[in-house]
Image: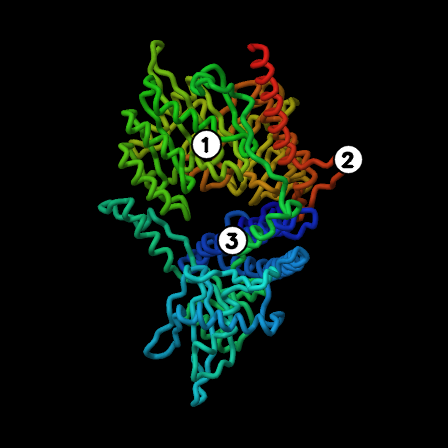
Amino acid sequence: MGNIYMNRELSWLKFNERVLEEAEKSDVPLCERMNFVSIYQSNLDEFFRVRVGSLQDQMLLNKKIRDNKTKMTSEEQIRAILKEVKHLNKRKDAAYKNLMDKAAEYGIRLIDFKTAKSDEKKFLEQYFNREIMPLSSPTIVGKRQPFPFLRNQEIYAVVVLETRSGKERIGIIPCTNNMLERLIEIPGGKGRYILSEDLILHYIGKVFKGYKVIGKSLIRVVRNADIDADALYDEDLDYREFMADLMKERKKLSPVRLDMSREIDGSVVDSLCRYLDVSSERVFRSQAPLDLSFVYKLQDLLRMNPELFYEKRVPQKSASFRDGESILKQVGEGDKLLSYPYESIRPFLHMLNEAAEDESVISIKMTLYRLAKQSKIVEALCEAAENGKEVVVLVELRARFDEENNIRWSRMLEKAGCQIIYGLEGFKVHSKLCLITKKGPEGIQYITQIGTGNYNEKTARLYTDLSLMTANEQIGMEAAKVFQALTKGETVEESDHLLVAPRCFQNRVIDMIEEEIRHKKSGEDAYIGLKLNSLTDKKIIDKLMEASRAGVRIDMIIRGISCLIPGIRGETENIRIISIVGRFLEHSRIYIFGCGEKRKYYISSADFMTRNTVKRVEVAAPVYDPAIKKRIQAMFDLMLSDNKKARAEGPDGAYIPVPCEGEAVNSQEVLYQEAYDQAAQRNSQTAQSIGMQR
């Protein structure tokens, strides 16, 4: 049974490998490939900070803790991760070199002192003396000068120094400085550049005069970010201020990885490991720069070459809405669905702004997880509160790496007069739920919006997500129950329409899988279709396996982690899993159960991970409108037919590109083209209507 399950962490590494493959593909435009190699690295940094950090803590606390699927211990998982990452990083280095060779063909070169010309070396030395050396803050480690604290993911130049008496010392200089340009242009207009850290490392001997340099390297530390806020929180403290202090503390957590740019003496590496309390197995040597975020500046330099980028795409007006009419009124007439990034988020923003000013609107309630830096959603909520509406906002301060942004927004909302809730004890609130309550001649009316992604205007242009807006009374009443529970610090105990974690989500999903098993066993058609970011919930996985053994056909589109291995005879042979990694981040979640008229559709913010199904407040909304059902099914079928960006998982757990047989299908590009075509058709109809009126 062991080979039916894939370890969660190793499955995630397979996902990041698929990201890296996009950087290696010759049919992906050059500057987009630069994006993917940088995303691979930033993904890996977060993975080490969160997942490896968590495993490290588990290992220290209890060495007997095992993964509940593969039975691997924390130590075994870390060992396997380190081995796989070292293999992938070699591919990353090769991909980076290839990309820079290609960039050179377009006149952009990143040089080092092996390729610098004599006049360039003269300029660089003068630049170092004038611009860098006066700002340097060197440290020589010794009895009176302890090893300095190295900030997370910042680059440092480390030098091994020999004194006149023959003793060795370690010198360190920070290379990350807001006053310094990281990408330094060499005069002459020839497109030649050098990274500031390479310049610092080359001339580091100038800073440590009186010593002999016997070895040097650039280093970068990645620190653990895994803090359990609930375990540390004291109820007598102000929660928001506690979280602000916790963010400062996280920056000081222990290292989980040490990156180095070149080989230096092993005893020095041992010393660095000892100072940083990191094992030698966690040391990674890199041929590529230690931080690849500078590639975005290279892209700006290449912007005049449109063939190096994806074709420009802009979110289109949704054909579901009529111009110049109330969004609230249109949703009241029938359910609406927005599909990002193909369609613009503007109708939802207009609806919020309209609700802020509509005299019949008595309240707006909303859950916020990750917000844009300049959030129009917060502006609308503040305006509503200032206009006398009841505005209740749950701001999840534990949204990892967005805590500081959320703390800032929560203060602004509170200042505007909104009632703020800071999540629930023991449960993150990850749902994407907005409830607008109106009171008119016919009584109370609810307008409910349920999304698969965050209320974030920036990611709505980069992530594929769905946003359902409905005036369905039953859905509105259950959404009201969710907010009533949240304001009391409780969770919903039961619901009939919405699936609401943690109490009535996992069990409802399992019930729907069991229903398909019963249909198959009684000779009826049975089907399950799922689109998820990740699948790790063992109870659901085991029930899906049971359905496969019963003969239920199961299609799954899983972007990232899948702990279930498909295609194993007698076990998972009726399950097909594909992953789509392309221009946009696949982020929407769709659940489909059943066949024909009995088929049920849900959209949700929840993956089938235990953290989502039983440890968070999540909401899945049923889709009742026949036209929207048809549209979601068409999207799902299109993604299943993708043969350009889809990779299929095999019974060995490996992912291979789906063969491109017949017409090439890139589902993301098809959906964007459909949005353009529908917008053009709508504009044409509007123009004709205006012409007829004239």
Q: In this view, does 48 lie above or below 335?
A: below
Number of disc labels: 3
Residue at 60% x, 22% y is: 630
| Residue wearing tag 3 | 42
Quarter of the rendering occupied by the C terminus: top right
Q: Are marks 1 and 3 in contact (CB under 8 Å)?
A: no
Residue at 51% x, 69% y is: 199
Which numbered disc flags the more N-terminal residue, 3 or 2? 3
**Pointer 1: residues within 10 angstroms few (<14), some, or many (20+)?**
many
- Residue 337 in the image: x percent, y percent? 52, 25
**Pointer 2: residues within 10 angstroms few (<14), some, or many (20+)?**
few
Nearer to us in this view, 119 or 267: 119
Which numbered disc flags the more N-terminal residue, 1 or 2? 1
Amino acid on which the number 1 mark rests in the picture = Phe
Q: Are marks 3 and 2 in contact (CB under 8 Å)?
A: no
Amino acid on which the number 3 mark rests in the picture = Ser
Q: Which residue lies furthest to the right in this view?
A: 662
- Residue 414 in the image: x percent, y percent? 28, 36
Residue at 43% x, 21% y is: 475
**Pointer 3: residues within 10 angstroms few (<14), some, or many (20+)?**
some
Q: In the rendered view, does 484 fall on the left or right side of 678?
A: left
Q: Which mark is residue 664?
A: none
Mark 1 residue element: loop
Q: Residue 662 carries which label?
A: 2
| Residue wearing tag 1 | 505
